Image (tube, rainbow, N blue to C red):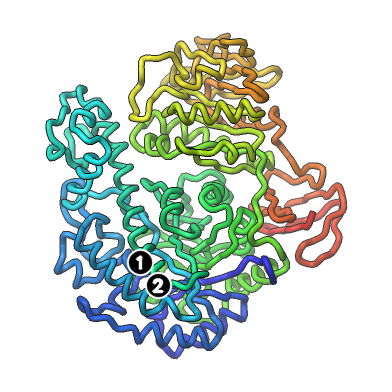
């Protein structure tokens, strides 16, 4: 099965009697599972008391894995320090914004910057790597678990001191920090780095926004340093072909830099039906289909990635409300969603539902009673389908355009409510339009050192609200357009510098020098204002929550105008030729109707229309010579093939109409 996507499962031998281990592993192999992940919450099993290491427990389990031919991903256990550690070294604990330390008993309650915690973490990682890394069954290592999940702010004394050192290295002198943070405002000037602290409670809850952006950069830097410390130790002992990874994609963290500096591959935890209570879903567009947006972001980190935790059951803690079990077909649908977007490895969470602890309602493949379930049968069906897709693993997802992102603007959104409103509306609108028009899209992340060749893979780039713009990034985008690319900016571009200040220059700032737009005024669409519309030729759509008033310059062409507002007849959209390509400046946000208009006019919609007609309720994705059609609806979907294709699983020919069942998946070879 060369080039096939492989399957795994998360397993906790410490939760089960040893008499179950062998039968569990054999049942896994029966449904195509070839790898187990173990040990991410098991520090005490190896180091029950300080400095005293025993390896018998996991040695026994690995012996069994080698006997039955099961691969193993070993984890470092630093996400849950043992009670002896937090009791003896309370400085290792994180604290809330009031400086009150968290207690022992949950997870991720440590802080990255405690010298003692880093020392003890390094010691246990070294002990595990030295003992287990040469085992034949061990094929990879997971660092910690879900870095920055649950806790992505840190207020301990250790973090306070480390933050000052971070700023000292970044700015050199207090005066340079005062300039970067705009400390003349509200008399925040510092005479010494010793006067600077991590955020503390304030009268109105507000903090210096430029300082907060640096605080988020500091958190990211701390997390990356902690992961890299562990990865460097493991590399001293691991076998040459074994990989190092971590899982999840969480906030206040530059996941791209972490992967570049510390990991061999990035892995994600995919829970498309994540629910916090009966009948509720998080505020995510399109429910489980919305997870395709996150998978696109993961793909920007690792073009081919892994899923360390793929949902198999209802997910809840004893502290949350009830959540539903996946409906028949949904586990396969979600696994194939991951595979379609670039996953080469899919590991299901978890083998059996935990009989005790906080996650007793976070259901696995099996229930408490250990009987076969329909979920287990569905894993076997997934294995059968993926085994038929030879050559899929290692292949690239096909996208003709991308949405540009960067961490300066992402972190800025965390501290700027205006930015969050714009970004949220446009990210959702572009995603919905892409899905409904079956226009596969990538995310592409840039920084000041980005290479234009990476951007040239795409005919069109959308950069919705590039508020922070640097000279290096402006030059990068100009070169992309000059070489034939099409760049589409949204409102409020270029009004901040790298420190988040708003310089005294005309908008859209640095990109205004070449994109052909001048913004002389703007307004939020809020309160009692009648929402503005935009007229583009014979198309009309809502402008969204904001409107820049745009004047064409330097030969740019006005394309669209506002209507139904006090600023009616003002220009909303310009286009300017730039070398072999062009730049659009759009003064609104990318609501779904606006995004549809752009995607259609730029020739990005329905790229597979000559092969198949697919209804909006289905997603379509192409990878490795296969076309995935994913039906996220609870009803049947009718598709129609315009030319002969073959069913990738059965090899049978398909042409004309075909019915995909509710939550069904069809993969065809094209």
Dot 1 crowding, Cα within 10 Å, few <14, some 14–19, many 20+: some
Mark 1 lies on residue? 233
Could you tell me which quadrant the N terminus lies in?
Answer: bottom right
Q: Is the residue 340 above or below the residue 368 in the image?
A: above
Q: Nearer the viewer, residue 461 or 203?
A: 461
Mark 2 lies on residue? 237
Circle 1/circle 2 CB separation < 8 Å: yes
Q: Is residue 461 left or right of residue 446?
A: right
Q: Nearer the viewer, residue 665 or 414?
A: 414
- Is residue 433 something that shows in the picture? no
Q: Secondary structure at mark 2?
A: loop
Q: Position of residue 440 (x, y in %)?
A: 65, 43
Q: Is residue 329 left or right of residue 224?
A: right
Q: Nearer the viewer, residue 440 or 204?
A: 440
Residue appearing at x 50%, y 23% in the figure: 491
Q: Secondary structure at mark 1?
A: helix
Could you tell me which quadrant the C terminus lies in?
Answer: bottom right
Residue appearing at x 33%, y 74% in the figure: 42
Residue 426: mark: none
Quarter of the image holding residue 608? Answer: top right
Q: Is the residue 294 above or below the residue 316 in the image?
A: above
Q: Nearer the viewer, residue 493 or 577?
A: 577
Q: Position of residue 394 (x, y in %)?
A: 63, 59
């Amino acid at each position: 099965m060369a080039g096939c996507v492989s399957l795994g499962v998360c397993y906790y031998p410490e939760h089960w009697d040893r008499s179950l281990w062998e039968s569990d592993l054999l049942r896994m192999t029966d449904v195509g599972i070839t790898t187990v992940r173990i040990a991410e919450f098991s520090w005490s099993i190896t180091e029950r008391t300080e400095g005293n290491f025993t390896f018998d427990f996991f040695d026994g389990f690995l012996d069994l894995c080698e006997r039955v031919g099961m691969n193993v991903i070993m984890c470092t256990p630093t996400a849950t320090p043992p009670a002896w550690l937090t009791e003896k070294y309370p400085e290792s604990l994180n604290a809330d914004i009031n400086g009150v330390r968290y207690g022992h008993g949950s997870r991720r309650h440590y802080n990255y910057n405690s010298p003692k915690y880093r020392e003890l973490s390094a010691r246990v990682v070294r002990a595990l790597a030295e003992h287990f890394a040469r085992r034949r069954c061990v094929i990879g290592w997971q660092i910690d678990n879900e870095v920055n999940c649950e806790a992505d702010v840190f207020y301990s004394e250790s973090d306070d001191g480390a933050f000052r050192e971070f700023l000292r290295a970044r700015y050199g002198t207090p005066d340079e920090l005062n300039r970067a943070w705009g400390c003349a405002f509200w008399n925040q000037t510092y005479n010494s780095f010793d006067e600077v602290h991590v955020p503390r409670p304030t009268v109105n809850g507000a903090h210096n926004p430029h300082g907060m952006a640096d605080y988020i950069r500091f958190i990211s830097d701390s997390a990356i340093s902690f992961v890299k410390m562990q990865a460097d130790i493991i590399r001293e002992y691991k076998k040459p072909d074994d990989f190092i990874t971590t899982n999840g994609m969480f906030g206040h963290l530059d996941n791209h830099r972490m992967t570049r500096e510390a990991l061999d591959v990035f892995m994600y935890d995919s829970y498309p039906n994540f629910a916090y209570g009966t009948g509720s879903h998080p505020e995510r567009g399109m429910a489980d289909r919305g997870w395709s947006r996150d998978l696109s972001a993961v793909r920007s980190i690792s073009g081919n990635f892994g899923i360390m935790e793929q949902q198999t059951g209802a997910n809840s803690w004893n502290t949350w409300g009830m959540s539903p079990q996946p409906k028949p077909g949904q586990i396969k649908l979600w696994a194939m969603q991951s595979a379609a977007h670039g996953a080469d490895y899919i590991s299901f969470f978890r083998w059996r539902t935990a009989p005790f602890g906080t996650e007793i309602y976070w259901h696995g493949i099996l229930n408490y009673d250990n009987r076969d379930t329909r979920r287990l049968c569905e894993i076997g069906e997934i294995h059968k389908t993926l085994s038929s897709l030879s050559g899929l693993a290692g292949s690239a997802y096909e996208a003709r355009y991308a949405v540009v992102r960067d961490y300066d603007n992402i972190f800025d959104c965390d501290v700027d409510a205006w930015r969050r409103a714009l970004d949220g509306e446009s990210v959702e609108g572009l995603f919905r339009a892409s899905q409904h028009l079956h226009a596969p899209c990538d995310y592409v992340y840039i920084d000041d050192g980005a290479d234009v060749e990476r951007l040239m893979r795409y005919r069109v780039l959308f950069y919705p609200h590039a508020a922070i713009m640097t000279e290096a990034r402006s030059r990068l985008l100009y070169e992309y357009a000059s070489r034939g690319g099409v760049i589409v900016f949204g409102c409020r571009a270029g009004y901040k510098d790298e420190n988040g200040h708003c310089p005294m220059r005309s908008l859209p700032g640095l990109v205004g020098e070449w994109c052909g737009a001048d913004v002389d005024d703007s307004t939020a669409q809020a309160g009692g204002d009648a929402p503005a519309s935009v007229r583009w030729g014979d198309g009309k759509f809502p402008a969204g929550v904001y409107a820049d008033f745009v004047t064409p310059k330097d030969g740019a062409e006005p394309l669209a105008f506002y209507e139904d507002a006090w600023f009616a007849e003002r220009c909303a959209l310009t286009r300017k030729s730039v070398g072999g390509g062009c730049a659009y400046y759009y003064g609104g946000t990318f609501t779904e109707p606006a995004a549809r208009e752009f995607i259609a006019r730029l020739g990005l919609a329905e790229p597979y229309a000559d092969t198949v007609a697919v209804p909006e309720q289905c997603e379509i994705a192409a990878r490795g010579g296969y076309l995935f059609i994913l039906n996220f609806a609870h009803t049947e979907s009718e598709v129609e093939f315009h030319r002969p294709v073959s069913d990738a699983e059965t090899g049978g020919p398909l042409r004309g109409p075909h019915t995909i069942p509710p939550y069904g998946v069809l993969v065809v070879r094209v």
